[in-house]
């Protein structure tokens, strides 16, 4: 076989999460309808939202030349000028951000935006230094974990775990452990956090922003599920951006993952860097997502849909899933659910579980219930290399998607409760 470069070895030979996703896909292919697929980040098909896309495609088709323009042209790598202007004006109008189209770049999805940004800021420098990206809270989005083209570049900080009542908990940034040294290139957090559903408070974000400003490094906020769109956030948060921040947004979770449209909001120098990387790697972006939503941005309908349709939809899903869990789990079982403050997942912690999350995943899979074992989300934890500082928590959590139809979520929770209770009993 052909020899692979370091880049090839790192990116072309699969990854833990890649294998897991394959495994999940395989289970669905064999199991078909029987399977409870509670493992993905797929947005739900909300009828009112799907109807908007259908209407927009009809409108686009009805205007002579519009469809041809969207499908038949290469746009500049930074994105369509009118789309970026519409976005900048929407942010000015609604949130008072000091922002222009020069602060906005389009990317092929948020995922690619992270590949570009993280590799441009962290890793090996021409003078031999290396820099890392600080994750102020783990668990954090698995999609970042394997993106480095060079050496591993995450420095993750374990959070404080706040136990709430008998069956809830919440992660808090442990600012005492957060030491921004010279080799930290950026601070990065998803808000809401995939997988935990945590939403860092405005105060926590302010504190992180101050740290970033003091050290003149960017604070990267991944708003894939966040404000202002799709607004799958159930707490009160203020949409924030200033030129020390890099905010990434996406059209995926509002219902257009197939258009692969990511949006980066940052100072102009980073926007130009992203445009450069887009042109080198892919020449240009897909246009159709930008074409579909541009008028919805101009009229603030995208914000209205986020606030009035998308947010209530996922909030209700979250409330229903938690109510089902309370009903299904035996109260004596030491289960805890992370406060569901946003995104599409219940993050469950089974303290002192006698089996690992991976074993639990296997047992659930045998019963046609697919979840994601939590250990995948704990990457970059430098302390875990130190045998004296083990963290059993990382093997005691699972992520379960709650966006599926109620009967699937119910069957999933029943099976999880049964397996977990059985595991505790066997202790
Ligand atoms: N960020 C987070 C936290 C996500 O969960 C996802 C997708 O699941 C992404 C970014 C990337 O999404 P996309 O590339 O579809 O915009």
Image (cartoon, rainbow, N blue to C red):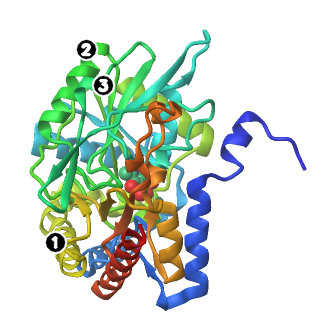
Residue 340 in sight: yes
Whether disc 2's CB lies below 8 Å from ligand 1 is answered no
Which residue occupies 51% across, 40% down?
115
Badge 2 element: helix
Whether label 2 touches label 1, CB < 8 Å: no
Q: Earlier in the sequence, mark 2 or mark 1?
A: 2
Badge 3 element: loop
Q: Nearer the viewer, residue 137 or 337?
A: 337
Q: Decide: few, some or many residues near mark 1? Use Cα within 10 Å; few <14, some 14-19, many ≥20.
A: few
Q: How many marks?
A: 3
Q: Is residue 236 above or below residue 368?
A: above
Q: Is residue 316 above or below residue 212?
A: below
Q: Decide: few, some or many residues near mark 3? Use Cα within 10 Å; few <14, some 14-19, many ≥20.
A: some
The spot of residue 148 in percent (x, y) is 57, 36
Distance from disc 3 to disc 2, alpha carbons, whole Å, reads 13 Å
Quadrant hosting residue 50: bottom left
Q: In terms of image quarters, where does ligand 1 lie? A: bottom left
The spot of residue 285 in percent (x, y) is 50, 50
Residue placed under numbered mark 1 in the picture: 319
Q: Quadrant of the C terminus?
A: bottom left
Q: Is residue 46 above or below residue 234?
A: below
Residue placed under numbered mark 3 in the picture: 178
Q: Earlier in the sequence, mark 3 or mark 2?
A: 3
């Amino acid at each position: 076989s052909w020899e692979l470069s370091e880049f090839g070895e790192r990116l072309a030979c699969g990854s833990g999460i890649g294998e897991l996703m394959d495994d999940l896909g395989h289970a669905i292919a064999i199991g078909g309808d029987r399977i409870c697929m509670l493992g993905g980040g797929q947005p739900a098909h909300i009828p009112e939202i799907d109807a908007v896309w259908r209407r927009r495609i009809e409108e686009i088709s009805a205007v002579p030349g519009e469809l041809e323009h969207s499908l038949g042209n290469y746009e500049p790598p930074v994105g369509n000028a009118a789309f970026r202007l519409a976005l900048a004006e929407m942010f000015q109008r609604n949130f008072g951000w000091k922002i222009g189209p020069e602060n906005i770049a389009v990317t092929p999805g948020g995922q690619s935006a992270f590949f570009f940004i993280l590799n441009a800021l962290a890793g090996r420098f021409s003078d031999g230094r290396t820099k890392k990206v600080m994750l102020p809270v783990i668990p954090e989005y698995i999609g970042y974990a394997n993106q480095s083209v060079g050496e591993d570049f995450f420095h993750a900080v374990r959070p404080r775990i706040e136990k709430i009542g008998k069956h809830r908990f919440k992660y808090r940034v442990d600012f005492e452990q957060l030491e921004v040294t010279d080799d930290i290139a950026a601070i990065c957090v998803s808000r809401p956090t995939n997988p935990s559903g945590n939403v860092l408070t405005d105060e926590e974000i302010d504190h992180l922003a101050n740290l970033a400003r003091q050290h003149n490094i960017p604070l990267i906020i991944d708003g894939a599920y966040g404000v202002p769109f799709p607004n799958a956030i159930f707490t009160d948060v203020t949409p924030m951006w200033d030129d020390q921040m890099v905010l990434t947004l996406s059209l995926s979770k509002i219902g257009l993952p197939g258009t692969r449209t990511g949006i980066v909001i940052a100072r102009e120098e980073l926007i130009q860097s992203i445009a450069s990387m887009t042109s080198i790697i892919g020449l240009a972006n897909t246009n159709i997502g930008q074409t579909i939503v541009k008028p919805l941005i101009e009229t603030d309908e995208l914000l209205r849909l986020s606030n009035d349709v998308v947010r209530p939809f996922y909030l209700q899903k979250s409330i229903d899933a938690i109510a089902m869990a309370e009903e299904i789990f035996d109260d004596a079982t030491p289960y805890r659910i992370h406060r569901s403050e946003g995104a599409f997942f219940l993050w469950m912690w089974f303290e002192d579980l006698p089996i690992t999350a991976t074993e639990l995943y296997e047992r659930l899979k045998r019963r046609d219930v697919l979840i994601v074992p939590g250990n995948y989300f704990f990457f970059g934890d430098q302390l875990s290399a130190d045998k004296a500082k083990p963290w059993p928590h990382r093997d005691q959590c699972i992520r379960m998607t709650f966006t599926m139809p109620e009967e699937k979520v119910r069957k999933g929770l029943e099976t999880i409760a049964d397996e977990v209770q059985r595991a505790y009993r066997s202790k």
